[in-house]
Image: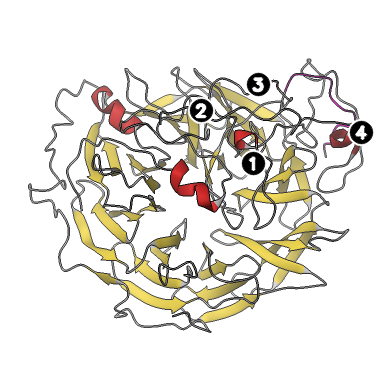
């Protein structure tokens, strides 16, 4: 088991404080609203640099304390930024201040920000184009609309009372209904199954086709969320503002009538169930007291609206103003800020509640997988023993399989994987981050100790932790795959052993643009290479075993649609059955042009 360093750094190197932020934005950099629309990076005056003093280590503290699992100290590192026989682990690495030079905000589970750390936006600057770009990890609610007002021109035609207890209802609930007919049903007059803008005209030999593309529904001027993207063997399904749309994966024709909700969608299950079901939550009103408490189950292939339910408040300071949804096997877990309620995914029946336990431990976040359900709790808040705890639950009953306390000062912010369990943690006081792996019994297994700045892309965490809000990172049974951060030019993907936290191998992007992990399948890592001004993006595969880890091209997207591809600001991506999918995750509400929603490429 590796040990954290025990001496303070000198200067330079990984995570070292800087006089000025790096000039480039990099993966996930926070962005300003654009001056006007367009496919490129959001434009505008960059925010001011970090204020002097904040985030700079003032004393040896960051290296004088053990890591989040309380391991003893050992082996001081060499001079900071100098070659070392054993590079220091991430425990205690000094970091800079949060975006725009402001310190992290306390309360509500806001994650502290350490630019350059995994899953956190680097300092403001350039970049910010296309998928995996431009999303800071922290922002106060009042600033969301302004920071996300990102315009874009689209080369496409139009596509298309609080309850006290959870109550399952039938699918004829009038509050969640489909329209009478599909929008743009693909008859040649719309955008399904045709190419009205001639996006495939002039396609070069070896380039993939634009299978289809969709524009987004109108959104309010303040913007709107477009969460989730679920791909089955038949349909590609996308939520946007108040609607859920479905398209045939091959040609893009409407698979079923859009489902329209009376209020905006506020949460979705990030993954679908084994039988192709998801759950969408929407607001119960528009007032300041409105809650994200209405649930609707949806069958992705048929559009059938299953059960509905109203989520009850958990108690004082634990309302359903904001919730998170996760699926674990046949269980849906609805997480509030201090508790959770589990439902049977098939029937909508309530299974159990997860509430306060012990003296002062409150469940604050959940993450689900095919066979695992993980809970993170905050314990002793405001007291001398304040700390987080990680537990694994039996999904069907809520029984606790194991609990692992985390050392005081460390906060669990993300799960890069649930099975195996890989968690990303931060320490606000030390301006430090850590990536750790826990074994099947919850014991600390290893920590990442690669001397590198990593850049997975993680979403917003406004009122609660968003454990499953990251992409651009992949994990298999033995290895964690992380993209390195770069201000310009090619980056690398580093394969890190879950056994000892050391780098196994690394592969450089095949172009001068950054490359990010998408998933592991068939013994190979699938990665996405961003488009450039003179080339479309690429989907590549990298062998995970053996000694050779060169990229092999799976798909070359067209050069003449690179601007469109690059314009999917904050985009979500997926690779399924030889097709590559892009979708927006936020709508700006701009009236200047029709915004993009989804795009698909294939042979």
- Circles 2 and 1: CB distance less than 8 Å? no
Q: Circle 3 sits on which residue?
A: 20
Locate residue 177, reporting x and y percent: 27, 72
- Foreground pick, 204 / 186: 186
218 displayed left or right of 53: left
Which label lies toward us, 4 or 2? 2
Q: Which residues are magenta?
A: 2-13
**Does the magenta stretch mainly form a helix, a strand or a loop?**
loop
Is residue 146 positioned above or below 451 on the image? Answer: below
Residue at mark 4? 74
**Residue 326's mark?**
none
Counting residues from the N terminus, which is met first, the one under dot 4 or under dot 1? 4
First in sequence: mark 3 or mark 2?
A: 3
| Residue 470 drawn at (x, y percent) | 54, 45
Q: CA distance from mark 4 to mark 1?
A: 26 Å
Mark 1, Cα crowd under 10 Å, few <14 / some 14-19 / many 20+, is few
Residue 295 in percent (x, y) is at 43, 71
Say the numbered circle drawn on residue 478: 1
- How far apart marks 4 and 2 lie (CA) works out to 42 Å
Whether residue 233 is situated above or below residue 163 in the rendered picture: above
Q: Quadrant of the N terminus?
A: top right
Is 178 placed left or right of 267 in the picture? left
Tell me which label, 4 or 3, sits earlier in the chain. Answer: 3
In the image, residue 119 above or below residue 324: above
If you read the primary sequence from the N terminus, does the residue marked by circle 4 or circle 2 appear first?
2
Would residue 216 appear left or right of 7 to someone viewing this image?
Answer: left
Q: Which tag, 1 or 3, sits closer to the chain's start?
A: 3
- Residue for badge 2: 46
């Amino acid at each position: 088991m590796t040990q954290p360093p025990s001496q303070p750094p000198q200067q330079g190197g990984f995570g070292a404080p800087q006089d000025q932020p790096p000039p480039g934005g990099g993966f996930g950099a926070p962005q300003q609203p654009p001056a006007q629309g367009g496919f490129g990076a959001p434009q505008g005056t960059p925010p001011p640099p970090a204020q002097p003093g904040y985030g700079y280590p003032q004393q040896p503290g960051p290296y004088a304390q053990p890591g989040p699992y309380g391991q003893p100290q050992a082996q001081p590192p060499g001079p900071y930024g100098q070659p070392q026989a054993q590079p220091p682990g991430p425990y205690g690495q000094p970091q800079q201040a949060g975006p725009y030079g402001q310190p992290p905000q306390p309360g509500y589970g806001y994650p502290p920000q350490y630019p350059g750390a995994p899953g956190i936006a680097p300092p403001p600057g350039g970049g910010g184009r296309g998928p995996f770009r431009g999303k800071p990890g922290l922002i106060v609610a009042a600033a969301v609309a302004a920071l996300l007002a990102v315009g874009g021109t689209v080369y496409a035609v139009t596509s298309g009372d609080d309850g006290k207890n959870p109550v399952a209802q039938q699918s004829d609930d009038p509050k969640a209904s489909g329209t009478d007919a599909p929008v743009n049903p693909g008859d040649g007059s719309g955008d399904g199954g045709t190419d009205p803008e001639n996006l495939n005209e002039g396609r070069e030999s070896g380039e993939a086709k634009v299978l289809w593309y969709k524009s987004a529904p109108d959104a309010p001027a303040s913007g709107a969320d477009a969460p989730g993207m679920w791909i089955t063997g038949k349909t590609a399904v996308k939520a946007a503002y108040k609607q859920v749309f479905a398209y045939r994966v091959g040609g893009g024709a409407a698979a079923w009538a859009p489902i329209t909700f009376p209020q905006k969608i506020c949460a979705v299950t990030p993954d679908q169930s084994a039988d192709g079901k998801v759950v969408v939550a929407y607001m119960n009103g528009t007032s300041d007291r409105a809650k994200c408490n209405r649930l609707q189950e949806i069958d992705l292939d048929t559009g059938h609206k299953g059960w509905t339910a109203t989520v009850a408040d958990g108690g004082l300071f634990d309302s359903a103003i904001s919730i998170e949804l996760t699926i674990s096997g046949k269980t849906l877990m609805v997480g509030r800020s201090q508790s959770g309620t589990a439902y049977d995914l098939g029937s909508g029946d309530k299974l159990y509640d997860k509430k306060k336990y012990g003296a002062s431990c409150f469940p604050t976040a959940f993450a689900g997988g095919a066979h695992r359900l993980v809970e993170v709790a905050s314990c002793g808040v405001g007291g001398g023993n304040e700390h987080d705890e990680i537990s694994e639950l039996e999904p069907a009953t809520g029984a606790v399989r194991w609990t692992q306390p985390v050392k005081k000062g460390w906060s669990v912010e993300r799960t890069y994987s649930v099975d195996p369990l890989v968690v990303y943690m931060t320490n606000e006081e030390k301006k430090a981050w850590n990536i750790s792996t826990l074994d099947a019994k919850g014991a600390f297994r290893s920590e990442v100790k690669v001397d590198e700045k990593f850049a997975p892309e993680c979403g917003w965490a406004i009122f609660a932790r968003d454990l499953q809000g990251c992409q651009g990172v992949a994990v298999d049974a033995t290895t964690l795959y992380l993209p390195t951060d770069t201000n310009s030019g090619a980056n690398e993907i580093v394969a890190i052993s879950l056994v000892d936290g050391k780098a196994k191998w690394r592969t450089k992007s095949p172009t001068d643009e950054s490359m990010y992990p998408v998933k592991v399948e068939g013994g190979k890592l699938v990665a996405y290479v961003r488009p450039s001004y003179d080339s479309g993006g690429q989907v590549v595969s990298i062998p995970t075993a053996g000694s050779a880890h060169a990229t092999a091209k799976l798909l070359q997207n067209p050069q003449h649609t690179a601007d469109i591809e690059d314009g999917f600001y904050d985009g979500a991506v997926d690779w399924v059955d030889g097709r590559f999918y892009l979708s927006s995750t936020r709508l700006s509400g701009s009236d200047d042009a029709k915004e993009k929603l989804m795009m698909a490429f294939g042979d």
